[in-house]
Image: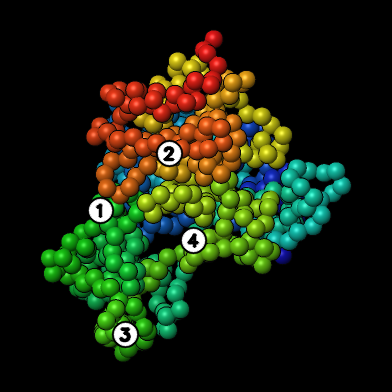
Amino acid sequence: MGELSPSAHLDKPFPPGRYPLIVVGSGPGGLQLSYSLSRLGIGHAVLSEDSAPGGMFRRWPVFQRMLSWTKPYTGLQRSSRAYERFDWNSLLADDERQRAVMPALMDGTSYFPSRPEMQRGLETFAERTDIKVRYDCRWESTSLTPSPSGGGQGGAQDFILGTSDGEYRAPIVVFAVGVAEPYRPPIPGLEQVPHYGDFQPVEHYKDRRVFIIGKQNSGFEIASGLLPWARQLILASPSPTKLSVNTHTLVGVRARYVQPYEDAALAGGVIILETTIEAVEAASSGYRVRTRNTEGRTLTMEVDDVIAATGFTCPLRDLPGLGVATFGQSRLPAQTPFWESATLPGIFFAGTITQGSAGLKKHGIPSNSGAVQGHRYNARVLAGHLAETRFGMRLPRPSLPAGELVAHLLSELSVGPELWHQRSYLARVVSLDRGQGITDEGVWPLAHFLDHGGADAVAITLESNGQGNPYPAVYLRKDGAVSEHLMEPNPLLDFRSGDYPRQMQAILEPVLAAAPAPA
């Protein structure tokens, strides 16, 4: 483990030592969490092995355009909360000057920002919000030790982080390190071919036959970029291709990458195969790829290039050995609804790793936590959760007159960005207590509301079933029992008028009858 000179320690924030909380990572997840913690007055250190803000957006996507949009013209003020529904790339802030950073940085040629624009957006946010990060500080190891007597928040043990700059200790560590470690399935010979992240300049693929292993967004992104260059493209994996335009969700290949799919359907220069890849072998002019389809038929192809678009894993280093359970191909850590390790208390996660907290997955549709527009809200909720459960704070909870409750809930369903971006995952919660009155509890993970129990309350969220527009879902807790109430979708995506007020009033009647009369 490397050591810095005393003067070098002074030139960088957060020298080695003990802190109440440590955040590892300076991508959008780490930046959003650090900002949210700072706004709550929670002291913490941020460490990053990168040299500047941005995380994976300093390198990817290969073809430079995001899949997430920032729409410049919406009829809404860009500083408004409602605008967040249309700006999927800016981080969240309270001050107007720090909000909606991205649209002003984009050149107007597309409402999908380029990779350099996304990088500048994160750098600008960090600069405007004065987020301090100890850059070029690589996390290398993790261990446990008893906490100093009477010291710190969060329990009786400290985590020790060995880094390239020295040793750090904290009772709470949040890892926001992304899902950015290339994954290669155990296919013989696959170790010799480039991964998505090793993609060469497009000129290299001119008039060549290219075999792409993987039919998710990264595979179709590469295929889209190579359409003008490659002689033939072959995309292969065992599973059929899903398109987001068919699932009506973000699950599946996004519309921007559908051109190769159409070329294959029209017998152009693209072939799409549902087949396992048995082996990749070096050949005199490139590679020989041996495949086997579901009927057991083998097919061997001679190609010039092979690219493994086979996904990524979490760079958790030694955390699994310390007790952090993981699951799936991406080695995502198993998490509670509030993004704490399910098996090692005190270890939390932020950013794209929070997709490991599965939520309800109604209709099989996962959370949007793998993308900035989803996990930025997770980070803000996590900061509030840590403030209350680990640092003894009580966050403000505004009271609501009973006569305004229906309009408040329908407004949140119509314009609340947390609900639009994290459907069936985050919920707006309102408690209804005869003694305390009606209180807006803020945004919670829906799974926590359903499992938590407690006083009478209502949680609202938007739900997608993959068949059309999203529709409101209302969960009513009365005398400890929870009932689910689904409302009809609206073709204009607004639930504040028509029959929706009457429907919501009828759903709430059992708890409103027991709540105090408005003052």
Real-space Cα separation, disc 1 to disc 2, in angstroms: 27 Å
Comparing marks 1 and 4, which lies closer to the viewer? 1
Q: Is residue 88 above or below residue 330?
A: above
Q: Residues within 10 Å of mark 2 (few under 14, many from 20)?
A: few
Q: Nearer the viewer, residue 391 or 124?
A: 391
Earlier residue among tags 3 and 4: 4
Q: Are marks 2 and 3 in contact (CB under 8 Å)?
A: no
Q: Nearer the viewer, residue 303 or 362?
A: 362
Real-space Cα separation, disc 1 to disc 3, in angstroms: 31 Å
Q: Nearer the viewer, residue 129 or 355?
A: 355
Q: Amino acid at mark 1?
A: Asn
Outermost residue toward the bottom in this view: 284
Earlier residue among tags 1 and 3: 1
Q: Amino acid at mark 2?
A: Glu
Earlier residue among tags 2 and 3: 3
Say which residue label 1 marks: 246
Q: Amino acid at mark 4?
A: Ala
Say which residue label 3 marks: 290
Say which residue label 2 marks: 484
Comparing marks 2 and 3, which lies closer to the viewer? 2
Earlier residue among tags 1 and 2: 1
